[in-house]
Image: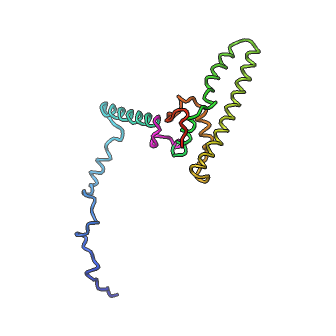
Amino acid sequence: MAKAPIKTDDVTDVTTDPTTTGKGRPTPTRREREEANRRPLVATGKEAQKAQRARLAEQRDRARVGLANGEEKFLPERDKGPQRKFIRDYIDARFSVGEAMIPIMVLVIIMSIVQVAAVQAVTIFVLWGFFLLAVVDCLVVGVRINRKLADKYGAAAVQRGNRWYAAMRAMQLKMMRLPKPQVKRGQFPA
């Protein structure tokens, strides 16, 4: 089998080609790799452990502050995305009946101490009525949120679980919500 002659204008010189570069360092020897693998993965010694603990505490504090401020990279998966931010802002801008759930429950506990049967019966009926009102409020806000998201992002692009997300946020006291509310009451998102 005869070889075809090579044309000199088709061959590029490897040494003059600027696109080919090496890794910039020699390949480590086997002994160097084994030495690198012998070092402990966990810090040893009191100073190294203190430094590692301080570094981890700083990372946790940064993540906690980032979560509270609503920074996207620190949010859990359920809170990420522009639709969830829209829901958070919408819920935080309105008063939800569910926000009063904890104070109402405290009143129910206090009223249950009273040994009068009529007072206890009225308290139970008020509690169930309030609970029903909070559920209706969550259903209404869920429908409203889905409609607003469909108008803003298109009906096909609306995420699943938005109603549940809105209801869970609406049932919390405003000061206890995470990420912290970024809007004041009445500042509904556009």
Q: How many marks?
A: 0
Task: Report if residue 71 lies within the magenta region.
Answer: yes
- 149 displayed left or right of 35: right
Magenta residues: mostly which secondary structure? helix
- 63 displayed left or right of 130: left
Q: Residue furthest top?
A: 115
Picture layout, residue 37 above or below residue 62: below
Q: Residue at x 31, y 30 (%)?
A: 46
Task: Report if residue 108 lies within the magenta region.
Answer: no
Relative to the observer, which residue lies in front, 178 or 42?
178
The spot of residue 27 in percent (x, y) is 27, 57
The spot of residue 99 in percent (x, y) is 60, 29
Q: Residue furthest bottom?
A: 2
Picture layout, residue 140 above or below residue 98: below
Picture layout, residue 190 above or below residue 11: above
In the rendered image, the quadrant that contains the C terminus is top right
The spot of residue 181 in percent (x, y) is 51, 34
In the rendered image, the quadrant that contains the N terminus is bottom left
Picture layout, residue 27 above or below residue 125: below
Coloration of the structure image: rainbow
Q: Residue at x 57, y 36 (%)?
A: 91
Span highlighted in magenta in the image: 68-79
Q: Residue at x 42, y 34 (%)?
A: 60
Q: Residue furthest left?
A: 16
- 16 displayed left or right of 157: left
The spot of residue 153 in percent (x, y) is 56, 51
